[in-house]
Amino acid sequence: MSAKFDLQSMPFVCIGHRGASGYEPENTLSSFERAIAMGCRWIELDVYQVEGELIVIHDSTLDRTTNGQGRVASQTLAYLRSLDAGNGQQIPTLTEVISAVDHRAGINIELKGKHTAAPVVALLHQLVKAGWDLAEFLISSFNHVELAEVGPLEPRLRTGAIFRRQDVEDCITKSVILGASCMGLSLRAVEPDLVERIHAAGLKIYAYTVNKSADINKMIAHGVDGVFTNFPDRVFERLPEN
Ligand code: G3P
Ligand code: CA
């Protein structure tokens, strides 16, 4: 495994949330490119499956981030690919993003849509045959039923359980049962004693979505292992050695 992607040994991980989405349209190729240019060794994105293709978009509806309308899962792939996701860019497929990133950063794939675990693992298995390393990927989800499908299909893939602020109770037990190596927590749920207990359970903790410099400082002081941020440059200003 390349040390570049090794989440276990990295002292602090600045994860470009939907790319550098404070600067470029979220979940687009330009956003991921910007995050990498800023120095991110990991980026994060959200996936849905439509007509067997994994596409990269956050919301379950198109209205906020594209010039289309309606539910993502109800559309044809052709319609989705005809839309403008910002600055004239298409909604990318996961394959396009992985190809564009081209080993320059690890990719945290968040399973947002239903029935995404199996096709994501199948795609990664194809990519392994083409020279990718499973360590370049982290699979995460708020949907723990979907996430639980990953391990039996590919036990070598790292997974992360994500929790909303109100669901943080039992997050350690649930993550351990899921076989996750890390968890994602809202920055509002992160407290130093919780971080200590998460670490004592052998898990890493990444906080989302940490955009303000004051919150970046707070999360570092609380001992988290990394942050999801729309503004990676603000993290690197604070931790230039990362
Ligand atoms: O995984 C961290 C973060 O991406 C979770 O929230 O809504 O941005 O997908 P959201
Ligand atoms: Ca996400």
Image (spheres, grey):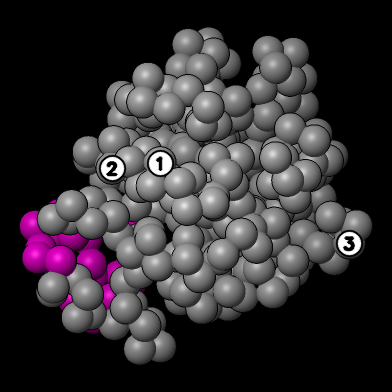
| In the depicted structure, whether residue 37 falls above or below residue 157 | below
- Pointer 2 with pointer 3, Cβ within 8 A: no
Nearer the observer, 223 or 57: 57
| In the depicted structure, whether residue 127 falls above or below residue 170 | below
Q: Residue 43 is drawn in which quadrant?
A: bottom right
User: From mark 2 to mark 1, how far is it between C-alphas?
Assistant: 10 Å
Q: Which residue is mark 2?
A: 119
Q: Amino acid at mark 3?
A: Pro
Q: Quadrant of the N terminus?
A: top right
Q: Is mark 2 within 8 Å of ligand 2?
A: no
Q: Earlier in the sequence, mark 1 or mark 3?
A: 1
Q: Percent position (x, y) of residue 123?
A: 35, 47
- Residue 77 in view of the camera: yes
Magenta residues, start to end: 58-77
Q: Nearer the viewer, mark 2 or mark 1?
A: 1
**Residue that appears at 47% across and 74% down:** 29
Q: Nearer the viewer, mark 1 or mark 3?
A: 1
Q: Earlier in the sequence, mark 2 or mark 3?
A: 2
Q: Which residue is mark 3?
A: 240
| In the depicted structure, whether residue 65 falls above or below residue 182 | below
SS at circle 3? loop
User: From mark 1 to mark 3, how far is it between C-alphas?
Assistant: 35 Å
Q: Which residue is mark 1?
A: 125
Q: Amino acid at mark 1?
A: His
- Pointer 1 with pointer 3, Cβ within 8 A: no
Q: Amino acid at mark 2?
A: Pro
